[in-house]
Amino acid sequence: MPRIGDGHGQPENAGGIRRGEQRRAERTSTERSKTDSAARGADASDQVSDMRARQARLVEAAKNAPDVRADRVAQARARIQEGFYEKPETRSAIADRMLQSFGLKD
């Protein structure tokens, strides 16, 4: 009669690996998988941090930008006074640009 642990009556190990070696190999594979997963998580976390830092810089730059560009306002006022916007070619150009901005014209 076979006894426990003498190898008889147990399924054949197809790879020829003893049980202890097989368990170690499984543990090593699992640990490697966990390490790879943690590294990918760290990369994603770094990317999110970088994006948040960039966003904060852009928000700060927008806050520091003037609300009104005085030079452009002065230029528009001067053009109005000289009748620049009354010219047919100027009106046509403005209309074309407006249509382009709405995606209605190439």
Image (tube, rainbow, N blue to C red):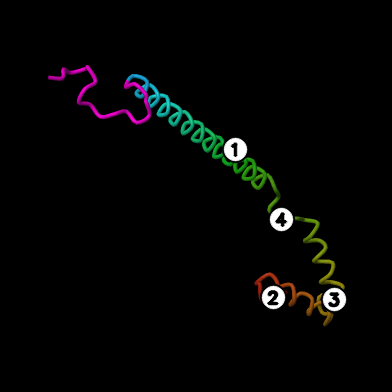
Q: Nearer the viewer, residue 103 or 79?
A: 103
| Residue farthest bottom in this picture | 88
- Crowd rating for badge 1 (residues with CA inside 10 Å; few <14, some 14–19, many 20+): few
Residue at which label 2 appears: 99
Q: Earlier in the sequence, mark 4 or mark 2?
A: 4
Amino acid type indicated by mark 3: Gly
Residue at which label 1 appears: 50
Q: Compared to 35, does 82 lie above or below?
A: below
Numbered label attached to residue 68: 4
Mark whose residue sits in front, 1 or 2: 1
Q: Earlier in the sequence, mark 4 or mark 3?
A: 4
Which residue is at 82% across, 77% downward?
90
Q: Nearer the viewer, residue 52 or 92?
A: 52
Which residue is at 84% across, 67% downward?
78
Part of the protein shown in magenta: 1-19
Mark whose residue sits in front, 4 or 1: 1
- Crowd rating for badge 2 (residues with CA inside 10 Å; few <14, some 14–19, many 20+): few
Q: CA distance from mark 1 to mark 2?
A: 37 Å
Numbered label attached to residue 83: 3
Secondary structure under tag 4 reads: loop
Q: CA distance from mark 3 to mark 1?
A: 50 Å
Query: Do the numbered discs 2 and 3 sit on residues whose CB atoms are within 8 Å?
Result: no
Q: CA distance from mark 2 to mark 3?
A: 23 Å
